[in-house]
Amino acid sequence: MFSKLKIRRVILILAAAIFITALLILVLLLNRPTGNIDNKVLFEVNGEPVTVGEYKTMTLYQEHDLLQYSIELKLKQILAKEHGAMADIRYEHLLEELAQKNIENANKKKKGEIVFGKNQFSVNEYYQIRMSEMETQTKEKIGKELTILDKEARAYYEANLDSLFKGTPEIKLRKISASYADKSENDRAALLSVMQDIENKSPDGFDDLYEKYKYTPRSSLKAEEQFFNTKTLKFDSMNGPYLFKAANQLNQDEISEIIEENGSFAIIKIIEIKQTYLPFATAKDEIIRKQSEEKYKATLEAMVAKAKVDVDESLLQRIKAQ
């Protein structure tokens, strides 16, 4: 004979099962295309159907060329299926996937588990997310399928050095600086006046003043060389962002205005700028990514040009009239 505790457990289990089933039915009802017209096939692209419901979801955020946009999006899905990035491209499958996702999230929330992202997605939100993921995954699949010889990759690398593979430039500069940290306001004003005098004598007098202060270590002004490169990039950009920005904006032999930061004034002159490039070994992954994107784009353009599209024109006119 069941105890009251066991009966109560059975009731709770049944209630939970009924709740989950009801939630599943509700989500399916809310997310399925509404009305007979939404279930109708508006057009087919290479034999793949697009219903009115999917067309509305596809073009929700589009203002122009709605039919062409939706045709190309369906072709992207076909391409994704061909490369194994999306196994089932039916709209009905996506709605089922969405319903299951929302139920899983609801169950996690009920159990107090962490749900990453939104708890519940609308059809439009989920569709946009899945299309974005699909495109990224298709390009990755194409990249893995590419066979690029080192000779071909190196030719691409050398042809696109300046446009794609520039590294952090190495900058050599001369700096005259004066620190007013822990000094009085009068001392600060006096140092600023000295730096303004240096600024007024630039550019012709900068090098002479630099040599003067370089060999006067006890002076309140300091003259030194400084280098910016890949190794020091993170430290330089955080420790002296204004000076770092100025150094990267000036051309060779140009002199900055007075730069004030971290309790000091500084004037810099760019002595040398050496452009660096990503090593070929590092750039090769980027080359594969670029070429996979180019192949994706070219393949899609060819598919668009050859696509067989059958449109239910009367149905399309009904939608436009709504």
Image: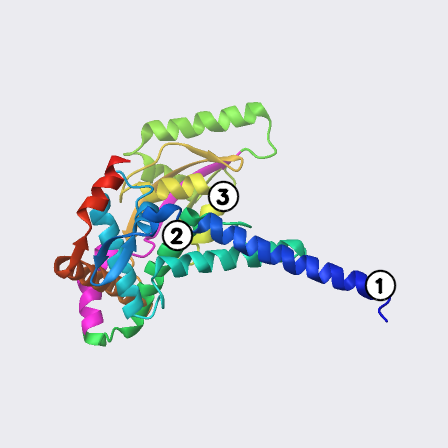
Q: Nearer the viewer, residue 183 or 63?
A: 63
From this viewpoint, which residue is outermost toward the left?
Answer: 305
Which residue carries the number 2 mark?
127
Q: Which residue is located at x 51 percent, y 24 percent?
A: 189
Q: Nearer the viewer, mark 3 or mark 2?
A: 2
Q: Earlier in the sequence, mark 3 or mark 1?
A: 1
> For residue 62: magenta?
no
- Residue 198 is tagged as none
The quadrant holding residue 253 is top left
- Residue 291: tell me if it is visible: yes
Which residue carries the number 1 mark?
5
In magenta, the rendered stretch is: 152-179
Residue 12: percent from the left, percent from the top?
Answer: 74, 59
Q: Nearer the viewer, mark 2 or mark 1?
A: 1
Q: Which residue is located at x 27 percent, y 58 percent?
A: 49
Please, which colouring scheme is shown? rainbow
Residue 114: percent from the left, percent from the top?
Answer: 62, 56
Type of the residue with mark 1: Leu
Q: Nearer the viewer, residue 138 or 271?
A: 138
Q: Mark 3 and mark 2: span between their CA atoms?
A: 67 Å
Which residue carries the number 3 mark?
217
Q: How many marks?
A: 3
Secondary structure beneath disc 3? loop
Q: Which residue is located at x 75 percent, y 64 percent?
A: 10
Q: Mark 2 and mark 1: span between their CA atoms?
A: 45 Å
Residue 184: percent from the left, percent from the top?
Answer: 60, 27
Left or right, 147 with respect to 256, comes to left
In contact (CB < 8 Å): disc 2 and disc 1: no
The quadrant holding residue 93 is bottom left
